[in-house]
Image (cartoon, grey):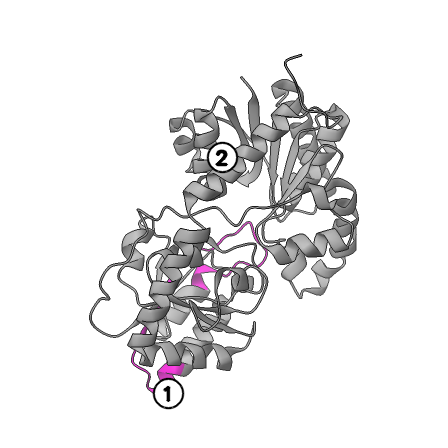
Amino acid sequence: MAKLLYFISEDWFFCSHFLDRAKLAQSQGFEIVVLAREGRHAQRIKDAGFRIVGLDMERSSTQLWKEWQVLRQVWRVYGQEKPDVLHHVALKPIIYGSLVARLRGLRAVVNAPVGMGYVFTSQDKKVRWLRPLVGLFLRNLLNPQGSKVIFENSEDLQAHVLRKAVRPLDAVLIQGAGVDTAVFHPVAAPQGDPIVVMAARMLKDKGVVEFVAAARLLRQRGVGARFWLVGAPDPGNPSSLTKAELMGWQAQGDVEWLGHQDDMPSLLQRCHIACLPSYREGLPKFLLEAMASGLAVVSTDVPGCRTAVQHGLTGLLVPARDVVALADALAQLISQPLQRADMGRCARARVEREFSGTHINQQTLELYQRLVATPFNGTPHTDA
């Protein structure tokens, strides 16, 4: 039995984006191990029949001693587990995992630079100095010999190939985490004022501040709509907003903050428009789930978001950080129920065609199987 080890920062992100793919791999004979920080989702991982190895890692830490301790943990786990395939997700797991894999002689590596992270979206001067250093590590560790690199959108794939950070034959396009189109499905539009929903971690670089400002502007214009913010702060991310800030906006009447919600399918069925004014994405799962639910969407014209949204067909795209443009696009869809319905139908059809979970899970499984069947020298195994 081949062993597949996922190295991912948080257990909740594994459950959100990789649980179904891991279940399919398990059904095809893979033993699944998850290396992640354990939280409230750890039991769900165990209930799926996987082993979880707890990792003491802070995503936002830059303290050398703490990072050295993380490296030691990864070194120990890789030595004990000896996985046949490694799947690293996001920047720290890619850098640390690929370095340890190289030193341990583990060659079947999948790296997934999902979203590109806070280091690449923040305007903070304290963070920007890290970019050249992170870029240097990525150039040397993102695509070691024997590895494959998964991108969620073609723009990121092409950019990394052009920068020679990834060899063209090792770049793999798998568009997002996939959506269960049986669970996320359209219903008749609810009655009452249109509800605009934004669901994400409550981070500045997700565009939460712009969403609130656009809602305030539309309220001042007298536009009849409700604006829901769904999601919790993420203290492990330097871009996180605070609970006090979110409650303050709600107290002012700008938005309704619902916090974390487990039942997203039912919540989306109560809404009319989905909005994600993010600064950058890999491929936003929330938008795909909203589209599968038959909602028209408003998002930003940035990598990832414009992969999901076809402007004028499944939704509207506006410049990032442009509150007025965001408010105008939302006002257009709020006032045009027939246009919303047409866009929602197109959005649903597109998810069924390109982003279904069945399709994404199978693509990922086939990648794992190719890595197991191909030794480091690139020559497939034979029965001879």
Which range of residues does the magenta coloring cover? 218-244
Q: Is residue 198 above or below residue 18?
A: below
Depth check: give the residue in front, 2 or 39.
2
Determine whether, in the image, residue 117 is placed left or right of residue 364: right
Query: For numbered disc 2, what is the local secondary structure?
Result: loop
x, y (%) of residue 128? 73, 60
Task: State the quadrant of the C terminus.
Answer: top right
Residue at 41%, 69% in the rendered image: 248
Quadrant in which residue 375 is drawn: top right
Determine whether, in the image, residue 261 is placed left or right of residue 311: left
x, y (%) of residue 7? 59, 35
Depth check: give the residue in front, 100 or 235.
100
Query: For numbered disc 1, what is the local secondary structure?
Result: helix
Residue at 53%, 50% in the rendered image: 175
Sequence-earlier tag: 1 or 2:
2
Which amino acid is tagged 1?
Arg
Q: Which residue is mark 1?
A: 221
Depth check: give the residue in front, 215 or 159.
159
For the residues marked 1 and 2, what is the alpha-carbon distance in whole angstroms?
46 Å
x, y (%) of residue 219? 36, 82
Q: Which mark is residue 34?
A: none
x, y (%) of residue 39? 46, 37
Crowding at label 2, few (<14), some or many (≥20) Cα neighbours within 10 Å?
some
- Magenta segment: does it hold 232? yes
- Depth check, mark 1 against mark 2: the one in front is 1
Crowding at label 1, few (<14), some or many (≥20) Cα neighbours within 10 Å?
few
Q: Residue furthest bottom?
A: 221
Q: Is residue 360 above or below residue 119?
A: above
Depth check: give the residue in front, 226 or 282.
282
Q: Residue furthest front?
A: 384
Q: Which residue is mark 2?
A: 38
Q: Is residue 223 above or below residue 162?
A: below
